[in-house]
Image: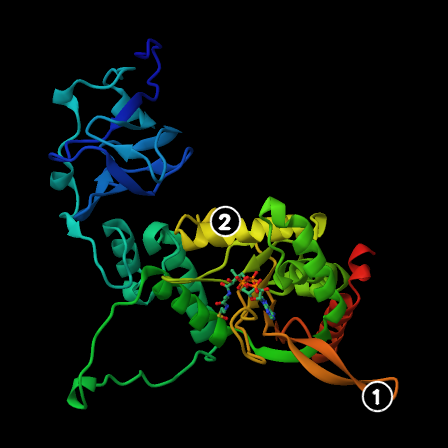
Amino acid sequence: MADTSTKPAAGIKQVLVPDIGDYKGVNVIEVMVKPGDTINVDDTLLTLETDKAAMDVPSPYAGTVKELHVEIGDKVSKDTLILVLETAESAAAEPAPAEAPPPSEAPAPVAAKTAPMEPVQAAGGHASPAIRRFARELGVDIARVAGSGAKGRVTKEDVQSFVKTALASGGTGSGLQVADMPTFDFAKYGEIETVPLSRIQKISGANLHRNWVNIPHVTQFDEADITDMEEFRKQLNAEYASQNIKVTPLAFMLKAAATALQQFPKFNASLNGDSLVLKRYFHIGVAVDTPDGLVVPVLRDVDKKGVVQLAKELSEISAKARDKKITAADMQGGCFTISSLGGIGGTAFTPIINAPEVAILGVSRSAMKPVYQNGQFVPRLMLPLSVSYDHRVIDGAQAARFSTYLAQVLTDIRRLAL
Ligand code: CAO
C-alpha cells in the first residue's frame, strides 16, 4: 500500500526473481539474507543453480528485509517473490506498490547485475559465486574448505569456521608446518585407472582429516564377555522374527553406550573454548558403510528406548543411508558415535573421533576364547571394544573406567535396566 503520511517514511518493495533466461524451477542453493538484515543495492540475496551453472541474484534496492519468502531447496522462476524490503527513506520518496511491479519495472536480468554464470565445479571446493567472492576477500583458498551444505557445497559458515580454525592454530604458531604431499606419476610404472572420489568421500575425508589433526586421540582397548547377551539376543530374534525385526549386537551396544554415557557425563560432552558443554540428552551416531562412502546417521534419545526399538530404528536408518535418502538433519546432534565393524571382522581398530564429540566406540568381531574362571578355562564369547577419546577432555583413568563399565554392562545386561 502507498504511504499516505506527510513525513517521509520508508517504502515497501517486493523483490522478485529477475529475468534468468529460459530457466524455470531453478534450485535455490544459498540464501544470504534473513529478516531484519540491512542490505545495500547489489548485495547478493540468493544463489540459484541450474544443472549447468550457479548464479547470484543481487538486490535491486537498499533497505531492511521485512519478510523472506524463499528458502534453500525451493524452486523459483522469473517473478517468484524473494522478499519484502523496507527501503531507506530516500528510496521511499517514490510510491511503493503493494503488489509486484509489472514486468517493465522488474529488476534487470541477473547477468547484467552480477558475476557471470559460473560453471558448477566437479572438484572439491564447490561454492556459489557469492561464497567464492567472500572467500577471496578473506584470502581463503576455497578448494581447501570442506563443504557442509547441500551436495557438499561450501557455505558462508564453512568459510568462517575455516578462518577461525586457521587463526586458532596459525595465530599461536602451533599450526602444522608440514610439507605438501608430493604428486606422483603412477602411469610411469604400469597401467592405472583414475576414479573420482564420491561427494561423500570428499566431505568425510576432509572432516576425518580435520578431526585427526586437531584432536589428541588416545584409544583404550577392552573386551566384553557377551556370552549371555548373545543367548538373550538369539531368543529375542526368534520372538521378533515374525515382525521382521532383526536384533544385532549393535542394538545392545547402543543401549549400553547410553547407560555408560549417563554414568560418565564427560564422554557426552563437547569442548567449547575453555568450557565443557555437558549434554543431558543421549543421541548416538552410527557409522554406516554405503557404496558411496561413510555416513553417520544419529539415533535420538537412545537412553529412553528399548533394545528392540533401537534394532528397528537402526535397520531403518541404515537402509535409508544405503538408499541415499539420508538428510543433513538425520546426521546432526550426535553426542557419541559407534563404529561397528563386527559384522565384517577384525580384532581391534582405532576409530577417529567425530568432532565436536569427544569419544567414539569401535566394535570388532566377537570370538570364542578360553577365559580363566574359577580355576579353569571356559569358552566365552568375547567382544573387542576400542574407545578413542579426546585427551584434552578425558584422562586415561576415566577412559579405562568408562570402557570397563561398558564391558560390565554388556557382560551382565541386567545392568541396562538399572
Ligand atoms: N561380532 C560378531 N558378529 C557381529 C557383530 C560383532 N560385533 N556385529 C554384527 N555381527 C553380525 C550380525 O549379528 C549379523 O549376523 P547375521 O547376519 O548372522 O545375523 C552380521 O554380523 C551382519 O551385521 P550387520 O553389519 O548387517 O548389522 P549391524 O547392526 O551389526 O551393523 C551397520 C549395522 C549399519 C553399522 C553396518 O552394516 C555397517 O555399515 N558397518 C560398517 C561401519 C563402518 O564402516 N565403520 C567404520 C567407519 S571408519 O571408522
| Residue at mark 1 | 376
Please say if 129 is above or below 386. Answer: above
Question: Would you say the residues marked 1 and 2 are in contact, meaning their CB atoms lie under 8 Å apart?
Answer: no
Q: Name the residue type under label 1.
A: Gln
Q: CA distance from mark 1 to mark 2?
A: 48 Å
- Residue name at image x 65 percent, y 55 percent: 237
Single out the residue that lies furthest toward the top. 4
Residue 33 is left or right of residue 56, and the answer is right
Q: 75 or 295, which lies in front? A: 295
| Residue at mark 2 | 330
Please say if 224 is above or below 12. Answer: below
Q: Name the front one of labels 1 and 2.
A: 1
Please say if 202 is above or below 177. Answer: above
x then y, percent, for residue 318 = 49, 54
Would you call the spot at circle 1 few (<14 residues within 10 Å), some (14-19), or many (20 or more)?
few
The image quadrant in which ligand 1 is located: bottom right
x then y, percent, for residue 51 = 19, 46
Disc with the residue nearer the chain's start (1 vs 2): 2
Q: Name the residue type under label 2.
A: Asp
Is residue 310 visible to us here? yes
Which quarter of the figure is the N terminus placed in? top left
x then y, percent, for residue 61 = 25, 31
Q: 270 or 359, which lies in front? A: 359
Single out the residue that lies furthest toward the right. 374
